[in-house]
Structures are given as structure tokens and as C-alpha cells.
Image: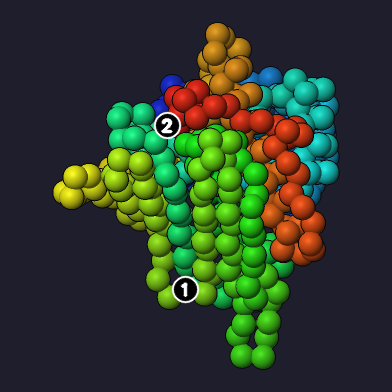
Amino acid sequence: MLRRARTAHAELFADRPVLGVDPGLGPVARADGLEVVGSLDDASRRLDPAATVVHVCTPPAVRAALLEEAAHLGYRRFVVEKPLAADRTALGRVLDVVRRRDLRVHVVSPWLHSALTARLAALLDGGLGEVRSVTVVQDKARFRRSLTNGSHTSALEVEIPHALGVLLRLLGDAEVRGASCTDLRWGERVVPRMGGARLTLRHRSGVRSRIRCDLTSPVRRRRITVETTTGARLVGHYPVAQDDDVAQLDVWRDGRGKRELLHDDALSRCLVHAYRGFAEGDGPGTTAGAADGLRLHARAVELLDDARRLTSADAAPHPLPHDTCPVPRPQEAARHAG
């Protein structure tokens, strides 16, 4: 995907090989524009840290330490896989490094840069009435990875972060009003809390949104349904695979429906957005936009942490008045939706 972005927007990228750092790998030969080095320190001798973007693909639990190490070597620009952190404690450590080291961080978030998300934001700002409810369904079969890979502790961490960011962007800040997980079962084997998840949010506007994820479904779908006070109904389908990057949107109003097809190479758009922001430096609006994006992702981590607490214990979610990472209002945030 990075190769595709570099080809389409060569002006944003240096014409040099990409360096990979993976301490768990043995010697790897250079292949297809990629060279593997032994450490960030080795990489800093090959590329100028001040002009280099670091893609962080490590597990969320070790993000803060890696950012600190990279910042010590002079790196300042980062593209980080979501979620930004594993929980509130880890989030605090990450944000401390970002602030103390004055880092620029973009979180990989294809749905937030999706053409479908941008179209929904435009329609909701165009006279369809107030949002009454939003429901997101994210289904796919995930038996093999759940049975063999313990990197996730619950189904809340798999697909739901995609939708959660979109709901915060379209509807504004929220609190968790309900969360549950089901176990994944294969014969006698049981993987706790990895069969599926449900999440209910109440936004500051009073709107309730719901996310449902079934990781045992034989059918793969990524659907968002928006109901408004005027009776309009928007049903959007995000692409379910990279080999067919077309989103579909059915717009129903006054008893009539119309289907729109949208080219939606969201991951490429996300990466290009990040690199364009880095290329523009700290000019007017760029720092503020990056900060808004980071706040949204930080808030998503907090809400997922609240949801995990509800699924594992009878604990109350943190109330809205004490949020540490409030997100921008929907009207402000929608301008950054794509």
C-alpha cells in the first residue's frame, strides 16, 4: 500500500529504499525497494531522522518506549498503527512522549479517510435533518487467527476501532452506555470474548449509536446505517477487501432510494494525508489538524478501555465531564474526514 501511495504521489516521498527494522528477523536480503536493518540506530545512520517518517507497527503495549527511543535518535514524524495505545495507562505514557518530545503522530485510520465517510458527513450537513440513530455492523469469519494468535484480548479490539472513530467524527464525543462480548467456539476449544462484540454509545447531542461485530459470521460486511429526524435513511457499505475498493451508499428519502458508487481507496488516502501533512511542516492549520486527529484517536482508546471494563467487571464508565481527550465538535471534525 505504501508503494502504491509513493507511485501516485511521488512528490511527497524521497526516491530512496524503505528501511525496515524488525529485531525478530534474521538477515533479510534487499527486495523490491525494501532494506532491513538491525535497529533504529542503524537506520539513523542511513537516513536523516529529521527528514524521515517512522511507521510504527509494534503491539500497542510497547508504543511509548519505541517512540521515546526513536525521538532520542532525532525522529519526529510517525505513522502509528491503531489503536494508539492498549488502555488509558498506556495512552498516558504515549501522550507524555508525544508532548515532551514535540512529535508529529498520525494514526492509521482508513475509515476516517474513506470517501464514504466524507460523503456521509457532507449529506448530514446538507439538510437531511438531525441524526436520530446510527448503527454499524462489522461481520467476518475470524476463526483461524483467533485460535492461533493471542494478540487481542477481546473482539472489541478487532473491527470496532474502525467504526468508533467514524462515530466520534460524525456525531461528536460520547460515553459508553453498554458493551458485551461473546466467546468464540470451535469444537471443544473456547476463546473467551473473541466471538463478537456489541458497543452502545450516547453522544453529547443525545444521539445513541451502536456497533455490532460478529467474528463467526459466514458473510463479510461493513455497513453503516444512519436514520434522521426527517425520515431519511442512509445505508453505506465500506469495501470489505483491498482488491475491490468501491464503497456503496443507498440514500432513502421521501420513499425513494438512490444508490451511489464511490471509489474508496481509503488506506492510500490515509497515508497520503499523513505524508502531505508532514511535507507541509508546521504551517497554519497543519499542527492544529494533527492535534485534532490525535485527540480523536486518544478518545477512542479511552472509550474502548471503558468498554473492556464493562465486559470484564461491573464497573461504571468514566463520565463525560472528566474526559481527558475531548474530540472536536462534529462540524469541525467533518472538515478533516477525507
- Give the residue type at disc 2: Gly
Q: Position of residue 168 (x, y in %)?
A: 55, 39
**Residue 229 left/right relative to 83:** left
Corner quadrant of residue 282 = top right
User: Is residue 28 visible in this depiction of the protein?
Assistant: no
Residue 278 drawn at (x, y percent): 57, 21
Q: Quadrant of the C terminus?
A: top left
Mark 1 and mark 2: Cα distance apart in space: 30 Å
Residue 195 point in image, percent of width and height: 60, 72
Kindly identify the amino acid type of the residue bearing the numbered disc 1. Ser
Residue 256 in percent (x, y) is at: 16, 49
Q: Along the horizontal axis of the image, is 68 left or right of 243?
A: right
Q: Residue at x 47, y 67 (%)?
A: 140
Q: Which residue is drawn at 51% across and 49% down?
A: 209
Disc number placed over residue 338 in the picture, else none: 2
* Rendered image quadrant of residue 35: top right
Q: Residue at x 72, y 63 (%)?
A: 311
The residue carrying mark 1 is 217
